[in-house]
Image (tube, rainbow, N blue to C red):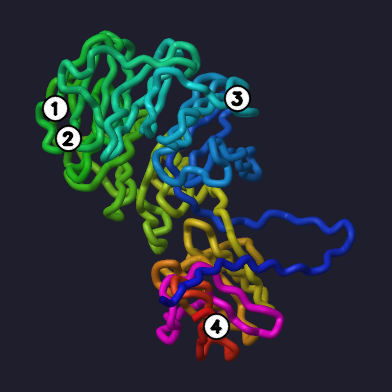
Amino acid sequence: MKRIILVFFTLLVFAPFGVGQTFNPTNGPWGNTIYSIAFNSNGKPFVGTQEQLTSFNGTVWNNISLLSCCPSYPFVGGFKPIASRGDTLIYADDDFENTGKLWLSTNDGVSFSNIQTSGLPLTTVGCITFDQDGHMLLGSVRLTGFSVGGGLWKSTNLGSTWNLLGNQSAVGMDIKSVATILIQGDTLLVGTFQNNGMFRSVDNGTSWEVINNGLTNLTIPSLTQTSGNLFCGTEGNGVFKSINQGQTWLQTSLNTHYIVALVSHNNILLAGSRTDNGGIFRSTDNGATWVSSNSGLNIEAPNGLDIRTLTVNASGEFFAGTTADGIYKSTDNGLTWRQFGTPLQSKVVVKKDNGTLFAGNTYSGTSRSTDDGATWKRISGIGNNVALATNGNVFVGSESAGLYESTDDGVTWTHKDNFPGSGVFSVAVNANGVIFAGSFGGVYRSTDNGVTWTNPSA
């Protein structure tokens, strides 16, 4: 039987640097998946990204040490919720197999410590917030195939112990997936994933009732309130409105799209959609009419209009977190947007003699800069394993689509149909100009700048 060998390359190129040489950050490449945004008491943003928590000090982004039980293998994906109240922040890394999933800061985010929780089941955290008394409320998600998790939980001691709020199962509220929590004094509203609908408690969680009257879609990932009215976002049926505290719901004119995020400020309503490239919608008349509000968003990028979260700071500035293009900020009530940043994790960077830079980013493909890193443009669909051949051509390997080559500084790309392997995990070029590509089929090499390939490991 033929043995298949899979090899991963890490190519390190060392160049001499003069004594005292300094490095300055480039303006990007920006991107990353943004799951959550919260601000400390000084307005400093803390952001839950694809892999970890990061913060912005006004000049640069600082990745906070991996908040995970296993720093070498952080939990990637999930929800990564973060919430703040005063100088207290709480963050969940979403590792449902880890009892130490919650991290607490009581000094405005200067440092975080792991909360060894008691009472909270092994589960993914879908959302987290603070109630009017400063107590923590946590929405649990029961993953498919698991028998534990779900429900709304409360902690009165900064997360050390947790209790399930009330007899939720009495009204069929054995919630499998809590998506969002809205607090109005002693009234709590809960929206759920997995078609579980909406629930309400008017006595701070002691008793519960179902409030689905008028809803045509029972997956409710987002909630907000303005001018005494409630709004909920649904999976595919847009936004619904209630003028009687959730007793009944009416469909608004935004009646399509998967609305994963809602935010309101000074009678401005914003709705963020996911998976259907709708982007952001805006209403100034209490939800009666909605208009698209995507000016400034990267509509050319893959998933550029895929919104994950919306929030507003104390100054009334709106922030939008996207699936692959980082954070955008609006200072004009959501009319226009500009990229706020969040750095990508770049696994490899190559520079051509003419100054063109290529950065292979861990979760967001490859980015290209033609002005020494001042600006970057993301290249869609070609992977993130970058190497520069001796003839100046650029090769990028994709784990799902094989190998690509550019002969014009990254303006256009050609799929290398002659490459015999399938997924390409790494590409490297040695000092003699030999190109190596590690794939599912083993290690392939080319001595003629990618024209032909052989597999020495076959």
Residue at horizontal 84 percent and vertical 59 percent from the top: 21
Residue where numbered disc 2 is placed: 218
How far apart marks 4 and 3 lie (CA) works out to 56 Å
Q: Earlier in the sequence, mark 1 or mark 2?
A: 1
Crowding around mark 3 (Cα neighbors within 10 Å: few <14, some 14 to 19, many 20+) is many
Q: Give the amino acid type for the residue marked by disc 4 in the picture.
A: Pro
Residue where numbered disc 3 is placed: 108
Of residue 447 and residue 24, the one placed in the foreground of this image is: 447
Residue at horizontal 53 percent and vertical 76 percent from the top: 443
Q: Quadrant of residue 300?
A: bottom left
Q: Give the amino acid type for the residue marked by disc 2 in the picture.
A: Leu
Is residue 208 in the magenta section? no
Q: Earlier in the sequence, mark 4 or mark 1?
A: 1
User: What is the magenta segment's predominant secondary structure?
Assistant: loop
Q: Which residues are magenta?
A: 409-437
Give the percent coordinates (x, y) of residue 255.
17, 43
With respect to residue 18, does 191 lie above or below?
above
Q: Which mark is residue 456?
A: 4
